[in-house]
Image: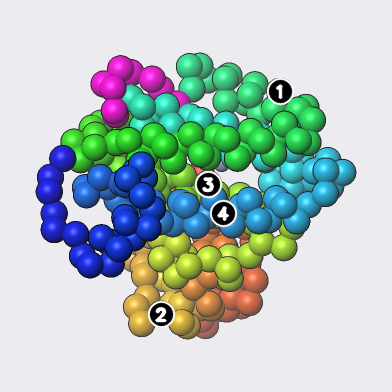
Amino acid sequence: MSVRELTPEEVALRERQGAGARYDADAAPHGELALARRGTAYFARKLMELSDDELDAPSLLPGWSRRHLIAHVGYNARAVARLVEWARTGVETPMYASDSQRWDEIVLGSTLPARALRHLVEHAAVHLNVEWRDLDDAGWDALVVTAQGRTVPARETAWMRAKEVWVHAVDLASGGSFLDFPDEMVDGIIADVFRVWTRRSEDVALTVRPTDRAEEQSFGEGGLAVTGAAADIARWLAGRGARRLVAVGGDELPAIPRWF
Ligand code: ZN
């Protein structure tokens, strides 16, 4: 572990927390971890606003009840924790042991009593956080393989999880909104969608001009320009529908590829 001089604020914080508290390694992706942790709290808040009976209703994901979605978010934390464990120990532990495991878990988890379902989400998130806290500087650069088969450094697990908790909090359909997201999350989603399209060599051209940002972002050449609040653009690019967006010089928004 590398040694860095603590700021007076950090010294004061550590004194308040006591000797037993643990901290992220210096080389940890601090910004993405902060987004994942805030998103976890946001998801928990949106879940808390639903009664047990309301969990049976549909989520915003086609064919998924809120129960399916909640089980998925819980088991996703466990799957991401397996990647972090892999980075820490060097012992290969993939997100899912088989192609069917992910969906089987969701289906089975969705039948849990409401209380158990809520506990699953909470405990899996705490466990993931412990794995992150225990990862040292070298561990954050250790290579792991995602469920999509991409080889990535363990530091990517923080952003992977941040996307899950923020976007699925909206999918819960309990009043969550992209308008609640921190700016870095909104901008990160827009950049992420374009990265995924690049990876898949999607044949699409588009410029997005967020009215509340200084810069526009383009994908491909000569595409239509779409303008609106950055949060609404992120929502649309994430496949969650178009709201308050305008295509410059055209009457209809262009069709766009899926994100995942
Ligand atoms: Zn998901």
Q: Say few, some or many: other residues with alpha carbon within 10 Å of mark 4 (under 14 / 14 to 19 / 20 or more).
A: some
Q: Are marks 1 and 2 in contact (CB under 8 Å)?
A: no
Where residue 92 appears, x then y in whole percent? Answer: 33, 18
Tell me which numbered mark, 2 or 3, is placed earlier along the sequence: 3
| 132 vs 14: above or below | above
| 87 vs 62: above or below | above
Q: Which mark is residue 41?
A: 4
Q: Which mark is residue 239?
A: none
Question: Residue, x 43% and y 44% (percent of image)?
Answer: 160
Q: Amino acid at mark 4?
A: Ala
Tell me which numbered mark, 4 or 3, is placed earlier along the sequence: 4
Q: Disc 4 on helix, strand or loop?
A: helix
Q: Are marks 4 and 2 in contact (CB under 8 Å)?
A: no
Q: Which residues are the magenta region?
A: 87-95
Q: CA distance from mark 4 to mark 2?
A: 26 Å
Where residue 109 appears, x then y in whole percent? Answer: 69, 27
